[in-house]
């Protein structure tokens, strides 16, 4: 799965145990710009380095797996947890959401009188 959005927050690396580490990223996802969603993703183990070269405000595309698991407490009640686990991240460009300006030809003054170098047939 993939999603595009703006980086809202990036956590430091969280060491859960000596064999497990993770890092979280909050993505501002605006399918409807009036009501943006703030979605938490996580990267684990060697993938925590994916967030090293991005900063808050960057536009990115995240590729992730949807994971879910049950957990049963001491009373026997089962709860379910979902995780959005990032496996690839692609920076998309300018942080302000504006794409690079397209290149256009140099403007021409069309009010000038035609000269000898005018090769237009009309």
Image (cartoon, grey):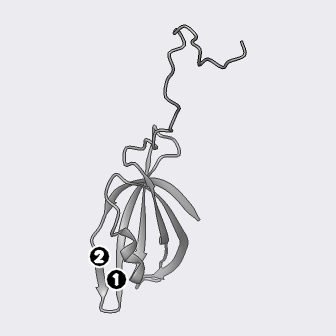
Residue at position x 37%, y 54% in the image? 58
Residue at position x 37%, y 76% in the image? 48
Residue 11, quarter of the rendered image: bottom left
* Residue at image mark 2: 13
Asked if residue 48 lies left or right of residue 99, the reply is left
On-image quarter of the N terminus: bottom right
Question: Residue 91 at what x, y percent from top left?
Answer: 44, 59
Q: Determine the secondary structure under disc 2.
A: loop
Q: Are marks 2 and 1 in contact (CB under 8 Å)?
A: yes
User: Which residue sits furthest front?
Assistant: 116
Q: Which badge, 2 or 1, comes first in the chain's sequence?
A: 2
Location of residue 106 with respect to 59 vertically, above or below: above
Closest to the observer, 108 or 1: 108
Residue at position x 53%, y 66% in the image? 63
Closest to the observer, 46 or 106: 106
Question: Residue 53 at what x, y percent from top left?
Answer: 34, 66
User: Which residue sits furthest bottom?
Assistant: 18
Q: Would you call the spot at circle 1 few (<14 residues within 10 Å), some (14-19), or many (20 or more)?
A: some
Question: Residue 46 at what x, y percent from top left?
Answer: 40, 82
């Amino acid at each position: 799965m993939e999603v595009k959005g703006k980086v809202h927050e990036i956590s430091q690396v969280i060491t859960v145990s000596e064999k497990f580490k993770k890092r979280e990223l909050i993505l501002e996802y605006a399918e409807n710009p009036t009501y943006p969603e703030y979605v938490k993703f996580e990267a684990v183990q060697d993938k925590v380095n994916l967030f090293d070269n991005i900063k808050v405000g960057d536009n990115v595309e995240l590729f992730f797996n949807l994971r879910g698991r049950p957990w049963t407490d001491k009373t026997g009640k089962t709860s379910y947890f979902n995780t959005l686990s990032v496996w690839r991240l692609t920076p998309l460009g300018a942080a302000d959401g504006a794409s690079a300006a397209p290149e256009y030809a140099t403007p021409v003054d069309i009010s000038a009188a035609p000269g000898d170098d005018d090769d237009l047939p009309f």
